Amino acid sequence: MLLLVAWTPYGIAYRKTLSTEQFMGLIGRDAIDDNNVYLALMRQAAEGKVLFSNNFTPEPNRPALFNFIYLVLGRLAGATGWSLDLVHRLFGGLSIVLLVLVTYAFIATAIRKPWYRRMALVLACFGVGFVWLAQLGYRLTGIHSKTVDSWLVETSLFHAMLVYPHFVFSAALIVGSLLFLLKAERAGRYAPALAGGLFAAILAASHTFEVVVLLPTAVTYFLLDGMVRGRIPDPRRWLYMVLIVGLPLPVLLLNRWTLTREPMWGNVVARLNFYTPDPFRLALGLGASFFIVLLTFDGFLRPNRSAGERMAKAWLLVALALAYFP
């Protein structure tokens, strides 16, 4: 169902394109600039390149390896002869499927009743902020309250499904990594923790910004769980954390070295400016799911709570803290 809804605008655009025109495979004002960068990286990879040049500047710059995912997607397009747009769209579809699967499994670690699990999954996939309410208020009162979801696609997962495949893929990697950590602790086995660490490493190689959320969430969960239990975690659990946190570190160090070595790429990242909304606009942008959390929240250190619930609370704490971290 999600695939049908997410791909419908593209199907309509293709069908309505005149013979004298060409649909570029992108919809929405927010999708144009960034996706053109990603497609440009895919084109370079399809042409056989491993290192990417920054083609959006007249300044000379040395090629660098910056995004593993678009290297793989571009090579796939080059090997199969498929168009970049087709490969990009298939990647988006597979990312949606992966996200739904790992999200439901993650929800199942905290919620027992199937009906509530399904409701949580629907909220996760379709829940959006109250940007529509802000627009209605502006029309009625003339007072403009710009909610965070009006400019930040990541706060609306369904919006990301429509326009940014690798945002969806990154979300799936975050959820999957935390899920595998929980599974490792429940089963007492290293294999799930290793899988979670590999998910984190792939995340670091494809969308490094999101690792800033993933790693503190895992560490915060570990600390909260230790505080609830009232004792130091056993050595096995420490090793699980080492796998989750340690495997992406070499990729992060490589990215840092690349930014230091290549001033052109470093300047691009340095110019990124993330606007921090006031709490009111942030709350409206997070929507119904956030207000449900506020109404049902009973603290971080409640005993007899599932590990999945504690992980979700750690994630909430980290996400809200990072929103206002300088």
Image (cartoon, rainbow, N blue to C red):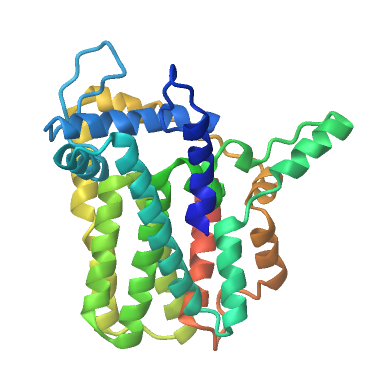
Q: Please give left or right for residue 125 compared with residue 187 in the image.
A: right
**Depth order, front residue of 184/226:** 184
Q: Is residue 153 left or right of residue 106?
A: right
Query: Taking the image as drawn, is residue 199 in sight?
Result: yes
In the rendered image, residue 248, in percent from the top left (x then y), is placed at 24, 56
Q: Residue at x 21, y 39 (%)?
A: 77
Q: Residue at x 33, y 82 (%)?
A: 185
Residue 321 makes an appearance in the image = no
Above or below for 121 versus 271? below
Q: Position of residue 197 (x, y in %)?
A: 25, 65
Place residue 143 in its image quadrant: top right
Residue sticking out furthest to the right? 141
In this picture, is 22 found above or below 94?
A: above
Q: Is residue 225 left or right of residue 276?
A: left
* Residue drawn at the location 77% of the way across and 44% of the way down: 133
Residue 74 position within the rendered picture, expressed as x and y whole percent measured from the top left: 22, 38
* Coordinates of residue 44 in the picture (x, y in percent): 19, 29
- In the image, residue 271 above or below residue 323: above
Furthest residue toward top:
58
> Left or right: 87 with respect to 117?
left
Q: 206 above or below 269?
A: below
